[in-house]
Amino acid sequence: MTARGRFVSFEGIDGAGKSSHIATLADWLRGRGHRVLLTREPGGTPLAEALRSLFLTQPMDALTEALLVFAGRRDHLAQVIVPALQRGEFVLCDRFTDATFAYQGAGRGFDGAVLGQLERWVQTAPQPGEGFIAPDLTLWFDVPAEVAAERRAAARAADRLEREDLDFFGRVREGYAARAAGEPQRFVRIDSHQSLPAVWQQVQHALETQPWA
């Protein structure tokens, strides 16, 4: 019987630098003989990518945002994440449910109890025997909102969420901090206000010190 794979999510406000290290971690894991799947949210399947496009371009309220991302997440779990875990692969996902609590919950001020109910419904695996699906490890790339804004401005044109103000991203950062405080066994804070090599050293250390590493 194939051993279950591991699920690692990458989180942080836009501009925190998390995406720079996903491919590096994938190569590092492959070099140690692991099979690795790279994916993202919103997105990861044709349906979820279509919802992502709406999410990032069309005006909507916080509940509509949450419903869209959770709908895409359900398809993503059923079609991609759970099958990969059952095959014994490492799944590296650029954002997952913590982002919904940080952005729609803390950032938009939406009801966390509603998000929690959606989380329970959506992340109960569609396949028998899997139970509730959540990351085994979450790497939270933490950086001040001002620094993240400077990085975004230098890197790309802003999408609908990236055009929010510093106060919004400050609340999102606080939302991530609250999630990390609530699940310290799952979260590892990465100080991403450092050089790329220094950030990578933190990522590598986080993986090497897991009990399942």
Image: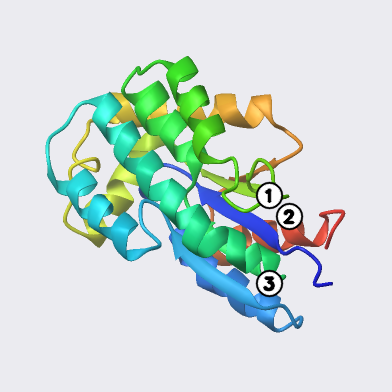
Mark 1 or mark 2: whose residue is earlier in sequence: 1
- Give yes or no for contact between labels 3 and 1 (Cβ–Cβ under 8 Å): no
Q: Residues within 10 Å of mark 2 (few under 14, many from 20)?
A: some
Query: Tags 1 and 2 in contact by the CB under 8 Å rule?
Result: yes
Residue shown at 58%/29% (left/top)?
Answer: 179
Q: Which amino acid type is marked by label 3?
A: Arg
Identify the residue position indicated by label 1 in the image.
137
Q: Label 2 amino acid?
A: Ala
Residue at position x 41%, y 22% in the image? 106
Quarter where residue 82 is shown? bottom right
Residue 148: percent from the left, percent from the top?
Answer: 36, 45
The residue lying toward the viewer, choosing from 125 and 22, is 125
As measured in the structure, the alpha-carbon distance from the residue carrying label 2 to the one carrying label 3 is 23 Å
Work out which quarter of the rendered image holds the C terminus and state it.
bottom right
As drawn, the residue found furthest toward the front would be 128
Task: Give how far apart the Cα atoms at labels 1 and 2 are.
Answer: 9 Å
Say if mark 2 contacts mark 3, CB within 8 Å.
Answer: no
Q: Residue under circle 3? A: 87
Q: Position of residue 173 (x, y in %)?
A: 45, 31
Residue 130 at x, y = what percent? 70, 50
Q: Residue at x 65, y 56 (%)?
A: 7
Question: Position of 113 compared to 170: left or right?
Answer: right
Residue 102 location in percent, x, y? 44, 31
Q: Which residue was labeled with disc 2?
A: 206
Mark 1 closeness class: few <14, some 14–19, many ≥20 residues within 10 Å: some
Q: Looking at the image, is mark 3 or mark 1 nearer the viewer?
A: 3
Question: Type of residue at label 1?
Answer: Leu
Tell which circle, 2 or 3, labels the residue nearer the N-terminal end.
Answer: 3
